[in-house]
Image: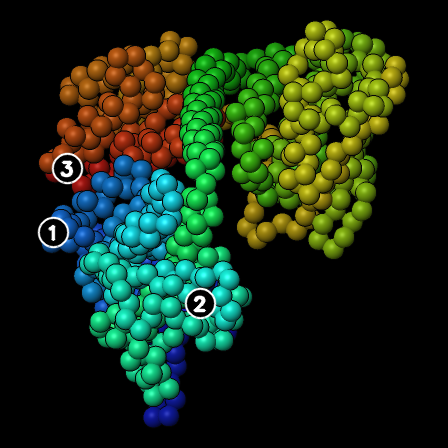
Amino acid sequence: MHYLVENTHIERLDNTHWKILGIAIDITETQETEQRFQAAVQNVVDGFAIIDENGFFELFNPAAEHIFGYHSSEIVGQSIRVLMTEPHCDKTDNYIARFLTRSLRQGLIGQGTMVQGQRKDGTTFPMELSVGEFTANGRRLYTSVVRDLSDRMRDEREQAVLHRMREKIWAMETTSDIAQVLHALREGLVAIDISFDNCGINVVQPTSDPLVFMPYAIGSSGQQLKQLKGAETMETSEIFAQAWRERRPFYRRDLAVEDGTGERTRLNKAFGGAVRSVIDLPFAHGTFAVNSHLPDAYSERYIVSLQELAAVLEEAFNRNSDITTREQHYLELEREIKIRQQTEEDLKEALSAAEGANRAKTQFMANMSHEIRTPMNAVIGMTELTLETALDDSQREYLDLVKTSAHSLLQLIDDILDLSKIEAGKIELENIAFDLRKTVESSVSTLALHAREKNIELTCRIDEDVANVVLGDASRLQQVLLNLLSNAFKFTEQGAVTVTVHRQAIDPGQTILRFEVRDTGIGIPADKCEYIFESFTQVDASTTRRYGGTGLGLSICSQIAEMMSGRIEVESEVGRGSTFAFTAPFSLETPPGLKNQSFAESESSAPHKTGSKLQILVAEDNLHNQKVAIGLLKRRGHSVTVANDGQEVLDLTRKIVFDTVFMDLQMRAKDGLETTRELRLREQGTDHRLHIIGLTAHAMEGDRQRCLDAGMDNYVTKPIRQQELDLALTAAYSAAMAAKTHSPE
């Protein structure tokens, strides 16, 4: 176990006794997490580093040490410019920090980018850089993952060289002109950066026994060695011949050793210079030979490249002797190139279309969210304001149903907007304590009025052994129930709809519940039951024409049930009705300090007092939403001024000192984000900062961050939930009090 001791007080009692008081915090789990993280970082094959927001290294793993040639002790605490190429490596630390911030804002976060890096020895190399962002202890830090692309780019370069060699050799009428072939080989070796003194071709004499090779060679400078003294018709040793027959490289290293002195002398005489190593790469018509004055010139990586050159040479000997074959090859090559080009074009078009469709889908979702949430804000807001007036019991009951139904509709809207995230598995379930009975009964009561209108009996039965309070996601449970209930009423003309909840099993700490929605509707054919949980699927086209619907409801229910570790199923008989049932486990243990919530508690309409009257400016261009905001804020005792667009906000804030602004993101002429940026720019050099709360009907992923990036202090979505509004006002009040405390007398 590991503990962190804080606020220690040491008191001496006598010469041998001391009293120590303090707070000990168990940090065992934190240290274990840190150890696992360190183990992963130390063993990952890619270079990994952590950089602070000023561009200084805080961590540098062994893979990064290998890539750049620095030890971590040389890098940690240094600026990233030590690993950057010209012109950045000579810039100041402040310049690097600004450069880093600007680059990250331009989209470097979350995607791979190819850049040039610089090693300790001064050499540069291509690398793929991926940057992530996280916050720790209030500090913004960046992760950097580096992958050395040198080998991959060398492979690509070699493949391009081999392709050019093929074209050049195949263009020859015949390979009998060895000089042309040698020059092509030499150019290939130079292009792929393999060091050599001489290269050549040993052409095998097919009828010789023992095997005889006719050698031809060319120097690294391009000068052809027309006569190889002592090697013109070299009879091979059995080892060399066996290597050629088995088509394996024959590599003789360090010919300076005693047992190689004879061969080295002969090779030196033949090539007119020192030869310390020579390698022969076999192909069907002989060997491709390369030699060097270095004792061990060719690594395994170079041998692979040389084998590929030998393979090209074999193709040339096999195909270049026949002009017809060569022409046919050109036709095949041309066709392959056209097919590849067409494939690339098709892929580009498909990618462009997919990206366009994704952008269009995202924009459609955002627009639909805004267009639906704007009137929903007025519906819910006006309903809540009316509920706060004097009403008789019937009026209050009706308006409560309106409010509950509106919130249910809003939840369904959210689910439709999140459909793509549900399919991607990115929706996270809540795990809070809630009143199960009230959640189920609330779902059923939402459809009570509809049941009376259709003269259908609606009943709800929850077994006595079902727990009242469980842990789980109440909103997702209610969403499934509302979907199944809506389906039941849609396809039932007479009879009854019944909701039952049974305890199917109970284990230590959790209970498995079974929810059933039974109707006496039209039923589903047996061969269609397995398809109805697929997206956009209904029993047949006539069902859509008669009853409406998109076919999304059951698909969403099925996916949510799976996310809750449960399953959904259906039993149905045509003409007699259907029973939809889903099971899900719920925890029975309530975490310490967690308050059990019901809908009545979480959606309380009682206005919350912040403690003092605030001077509030509401920037909103929709008349109905203006009235909702004015009503909600005045009921809480605040003074409200309305601005119809961003320019009015800028004008009014010059004349009047406001405590806070509720800023709608989408306004005509000048939107909320642009207006906020101008306000923050105007505040520079002053001690005043206006508290700004973003107000939007989009509620899409990323909206909150866009608001904060523009300079806003908080963010509230439409329709406005009173609990969320009260939290925002409390924060605004605290900011106003702090500003008044620090303002000059």
Lower position in the chain sequence, tag 3 or tag 2: 2
Q: Which residue is mark 3?
A: 687
Decide: few, some or many residues near mark 3? Use Cα within 10 Å; few <14, some 14-19, many ≥20.
few
Q: Which residue is mark 1?
A: 91
Which is in the foreground here, disc 3 or disc 2?
2
Going by the image, does 353 lie left or right of 665? right
Q: CA distance from mark 3 to mark 2?
A: 94 Å
Q: Which residue is mark 2?
A: 212
Relative image position of residue 558 (x, y in whole percent):
69, 32
Q: Residue at x 24, y 22 (%)?
A: 675
Lower position in the chain sequence, tag 3 or tag 1: 1
Which is in the foreground here, disc 1 or disc 2?
2
Q: Residue at x 38, y 44 (%)?
A: 174
Q: Are marks 3 and 1 in contact (CB under 8 Å)?
A: no
Q: Quadrant of residue 45?
A: bottom left
Residue 299 in view in this figure: no
Looking at the image, the residue that sits furthest to the bottom is 15
- Secondary structure of residue under mark 3: loop
Q: Amino acid at mark 3?
A: Asp
